[in-house]
């Protein structure tokens, strides 16, 4: 049954999460002419800030840790910063805050994002010199540690954050070790082949890259400062600073047991960005966007995804904002965003459109791997689903268009600067379908 | 009006003064097949997309015209070898990656921000000297007296070509510019003239480079000749000469048209001429709008290496594709009120310098030349007026601009 109150224009919209997605939604709501109350709740004391520089230019101190995002002056937001959301009453349409306040809402956007996955052993995680990197406070702790020239930095986890961190360390002349359990770094996003290429690049830059290795425990010295890690194979690596870069945990615990469909993969929502209840029907007036959302990607046969990238946070929040004002489903639009991301590390500009991780095959479509400038395409069931460029971003717009059109794999044959194309296995761990 | 002969009408000389109404019709079919098999692309979105498409090649020079002399050694050995070398060492505007990128990287290195910035003062001096030469005249021809000599002096200065050789260069540059203009390249007689000119300028450049190597001075040509690229070493002589010739030609004819079209536009919109005189700081915005509104380059031709489907149209493999940049820059779907000359436009990402990997390498210099020239003209010409409402144009439809622009003045202000 349609919810009659959802047809009335909202007069109070609450956004839980004051980061990129939350701010993007707020901006869009005002752009679309929404003039009612607009509340933004954030557990951090800071106004919305930009995260990508925190693992790049901020660490090398080319930028300060204050990466506050620009805001139009007339947003007219009721800010509730430094206070976390604690629970939702879907029936009463009320959100509870950690400081005891409660706010009624007509529409609620849940954009509470993720946090860094901590080292699983709390006693080791609390050793002086064991850090993580996700937010501004983390960067504030990390920057002086790096500036103090530690003898060796050890990074647990060879994903994007771990590799960007290592790149900054090398730029600063620091000795650095990456311990990664997979056979190649960044395998989940890049696959075996490109991951192996990156391993070569990373080692060429002087990083001690330990692949197929796992940290068994972290050891402190007598003063209680970090001293070494012991690997599962019994090897010991001395270090003065450890950064745990094991990915992210979605901030959904506060929603558990309240009737919404949550899991470790996030808060389920539909293609209209509506948050779903346990019976998979949309919760009236509740929407989700950004890293916390677990949603069906149209471009990927409706496969459920969680996308932890900047571009999706912006686009999904904007679409949620639109749909919050749409009244009923006939006025709503589908979030059709093709995920994309970028990274800069070890002198390379890495960009990707589409999600490669469900690919079966790949091919180098432009440039040359030896020359360290190339573009790889990824295919699934005969269709091109992703393209990844290394120092060749100029060609990406064309490949993006082809992916959006559902072009066959490989999408282009006979292009400028194209090597003889050879299909290879994509080399992703089999993913659950 | 038939779409499939529209481009021929655009190319016709009588469309030169105002091709924009034809562009508007053209845009109704953003990707339009012409009767000769060429595809013309005219909407902003489609042009943007194709500029970044690796299926389009810039290596579309027409096949060489080898003239039979009756001397078998020349006809069967020397000329074909020469032609092969020439084809392999085309200027990088006519080359694809990866070779293109290596050559372009070298040139970008020489077009350093410091070197370009240093040209502003020199350009001002050149501009004012040229205006000084018009003292006590009641009428000037903006092209011959100003727009034409200014860029050639600037580019010669930048490359390090001796002043006394400049007049010779003007002639060469004009002839070779026709080789950049696709609609003039198909003229056999003209193409042959260009080949001869190319031989002359090559010989000159070779001698000049040898002289510079013997007596090194800080300029672009010597920089190009001596720089060792970490991956590619030193530039070979053939590429060096074709690059030097490209910089000379591309940095010349286009800027002439930027300045002339600019002054023509300002004389047709006297309120903006007045504003520029009172507020020279608006020059950058004004030049940007000129590049959109009356660009020096109207289209570029590419070659489809594979079938391309765009906007529901399939462009077959092997087809020449005309990117009608000037029509894209007037696309109402991208620019509100596109036929209005408005230097205060908020977002002005025009195609005046092309786009993507062949984006004009000299754009920062061209902007300086345009700004300096128009500010100087606005400030120093007393009461300038157009003598003819429609000037006479060069034949070129791609490198489009007036051949002469007579302007009546009441004097020169000091």
Image (cartoon, rainbow, N blue to C red):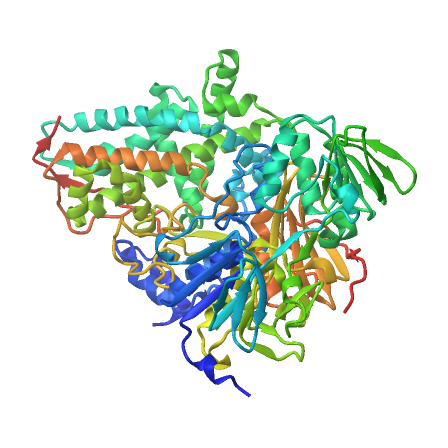
- Identify the residue at the far left of this view: B410
Q: Is residue B106 above or below residue A313?
A: above
Between B94 and B88, the residue placed more toward the observer is: B94
All told, the count of numbered labels is: 0
Residue B89 on image: x %, y % = 57, 36
Between A17 and A430, the residue placed more toward the observer is: A17
Residue A140 on image: x %, y % = 58, 37
- Identify the residue at the far front of this view: A100
Residue B351 on image: x %, y % = 40, 50
Q: Is residue A251 above or below residue B205?
A: below
Residue at figure coordinates x 55%, y 88% from the top left: A1
Residue at figure coordinates x 54%, y 42% from the top left: B66
Residue B113 quadrant: top left
Task: Please give left or right for residue B90 compared with residue B27 in the image.
Answer: right
Between A295 and A363, the residue placed more toward the observer is: A295
Residue B81 quadrant: top right
Task: Please give left or right for residue A154 compared with residue A109 in the image.
Answer: right
- Identify the residue at the far right of this view: A234
Residue B248 quadrant: top left
User: Can see residue B403?
Assistant: no
Between A278 and B347, the residue placed more toward the observer is: A278
Of the 4 image quadrants, the one containing the N terminus of chain B is: bottom left
Task: Please give left or right for residue B277 compared with residue A407 in the image.
Answer: left
User: Can see residue B212?
Assistant: yes
- Identify the residue at the far top of this view: B215
Of the 4 image quadrants, the one containing the C terminus of chain B is: top left
Task: Please give left or right for residue B224 compared with residue B185 in the image.
Answer: right
Residue B393 on image: x %, y % = 26, 48
């Amino acid at each position: 049954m349609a919810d009659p109150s959802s047809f009335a224009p909202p007069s109070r919209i609450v956004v839980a999460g004051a980061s990129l997605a939350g701010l993007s939604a707020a901006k869009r709501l005002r752009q679309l002419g929404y003039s009612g109350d607009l509340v933004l709740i954030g557990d951090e004391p800071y106004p919305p800030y930009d995260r990508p520089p925190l693992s790049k230019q901020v660490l090398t101190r080319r930028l300060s840790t204050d990466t506050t995002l620009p805001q139009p002056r007339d947003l007219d937001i009721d800010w509730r910063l430094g206070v976390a959301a604690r629970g939702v009453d879907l029936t009463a349409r009320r959100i509870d805050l950690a400081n005891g306040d409660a706010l009624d809402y007509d529409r609620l956007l849940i954009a509470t994002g993720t946090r860094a996955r901590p080292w699983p052993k709390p006693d080791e995680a609390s050793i002086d010199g064991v850090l993580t990197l996700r937010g501004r406070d983390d960067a504030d702790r990390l920057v002086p540690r790096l500036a103090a020239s530690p003898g060796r930095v050890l990074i647990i986890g060879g994903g994007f954050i771990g590799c960007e961190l290592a790149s900054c360390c090398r730029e600063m002349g620091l000795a650095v070790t990456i311990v990664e359990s997979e056979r190649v770094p960044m395998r989940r996003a890049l696959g075996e082949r490109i991951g192996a290429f990156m391993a070569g690049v990373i080692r060429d830059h002087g990083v001690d890259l330990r692949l197929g290795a796992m940290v068994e425990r972290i050891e402190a010295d007598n003063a209680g400062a970090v001293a070494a890690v012991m690997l599962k194979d019994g090897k010991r690596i001395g270090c003065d600073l450890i950064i745990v870069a094991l990915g992210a945990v979605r901030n959904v615990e506060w929603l558990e047991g309240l009737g919404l469909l949550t899991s470790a993969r996030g808060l389920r929502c539909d293609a209209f960005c509506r948050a779903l209840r346990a019976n998979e029907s949309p919760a009236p007036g509740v929407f989700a966007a950004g890293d916390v959302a677990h949603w069906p990607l149209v471009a990927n046969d409706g496969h459920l995804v969680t996308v932890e990238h900047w571009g999706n946070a912006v686009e999904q929040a904007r679409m949620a904002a639109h749909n919050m004002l749409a009244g009923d489903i006939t006025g709503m639009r589908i979030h059709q965003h093709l995920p994309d991301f970028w990274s800069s590390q070890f002198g390379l500009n890495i960009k990707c459109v589409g999600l490669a991780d469900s690919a079966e095959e790949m091919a180098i479509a432009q440039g040359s791997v030896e020359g360290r400038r190339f573009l790889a395409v990824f295919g699934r069931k005969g269709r091109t689903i992703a393209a990844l460029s290394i120092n060749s971003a100029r060609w990406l717009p064309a490949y993006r268009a082809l992916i959006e059109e559902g072009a066959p794999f490989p999408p282009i044959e006979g292009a400028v600067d194209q090597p003889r194309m050879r299909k290879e296995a994509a080399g992703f761990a089999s993913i659950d379908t | 009006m038939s779409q499939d002969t529209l481009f021929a009408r655009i190319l016709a000389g009588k469309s030169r003064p105002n091709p924009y109404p034809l562009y508007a019709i053209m845009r109704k079919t953003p990707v339009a097949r012409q009767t000769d098999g060429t595809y013309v692309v005219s909407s902003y979105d489609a042009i943007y997309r194709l500029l970044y498409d690796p299926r389009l090649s810039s290596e579309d020079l027409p096949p060489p015209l080898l003239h039979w002399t009756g001397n078998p050694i020349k006809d069967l050995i020397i000329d074909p070898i020469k032609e092969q070398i020439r084809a392999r060492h085309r200027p990088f505007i006519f080359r694809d990656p990866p070779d293109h990128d290596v050559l372009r990287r070298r040139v970008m290195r020489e077009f350093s921000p410091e070197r370009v910035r240093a040209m502003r003062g020199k350009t001002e001096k050149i501009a004012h000297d040229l205006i000084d030469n018009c003292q006590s005249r009641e009428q000037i021809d903006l092209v011959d007296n100003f727009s034409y000599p200014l860029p050639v002096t600037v580019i010669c200065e930048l490359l390090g070509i001796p002043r006394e050789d400049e007049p010779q260069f003007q002639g060469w540059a004009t002839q070779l510019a026709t080789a950049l203009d696709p609609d003039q390249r198909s003229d056999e007689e003209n193409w042959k003239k260009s080949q001869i000119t190319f031989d002359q300028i090559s010989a000159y450049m070779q001698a000049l480079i040898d002289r510079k190597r013997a007596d090194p001075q800080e300029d672009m040509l010597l920089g190009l000749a001596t720089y060792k690229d970490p991956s590619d070493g030193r530039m070979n002589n053939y590429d060096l000469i074709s690059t030097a010739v490209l910089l000379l030609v591309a940095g010349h004819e286009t800027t002439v048209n930027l300045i002339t079209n600019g002054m023509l536009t300002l004389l047709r919109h006297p309120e903006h001429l007045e504003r520029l005189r009172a507020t020279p700081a608006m020059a950058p915005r004004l030049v940007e709008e000129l590049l959109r509104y009356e660009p020096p380059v109207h289209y570029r031709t590419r070659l489809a290496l594979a079938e391309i489907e765009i906007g529901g149209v399939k462009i077959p493999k092997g087809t020449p594709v005309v990117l009608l940049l000037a029509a894209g820059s007037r696309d109402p779907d991208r620019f509100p009120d596109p036929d209005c000359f408005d230097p205060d436009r908020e977002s002005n990402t025009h195609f005046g310098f092309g786009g993507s990997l062949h984006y004009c390498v000299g754009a920062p210099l061209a902007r300086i030349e345009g700004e300096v020239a128009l500010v100087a003209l606005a400030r120093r010409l007393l009461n300038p007026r157009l003598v003819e409402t429609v000037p006479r144009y060069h034949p070129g439809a791609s490198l489009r601009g007036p051949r002469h622009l007579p302007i009546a003045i009441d004097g020169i202000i000091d």
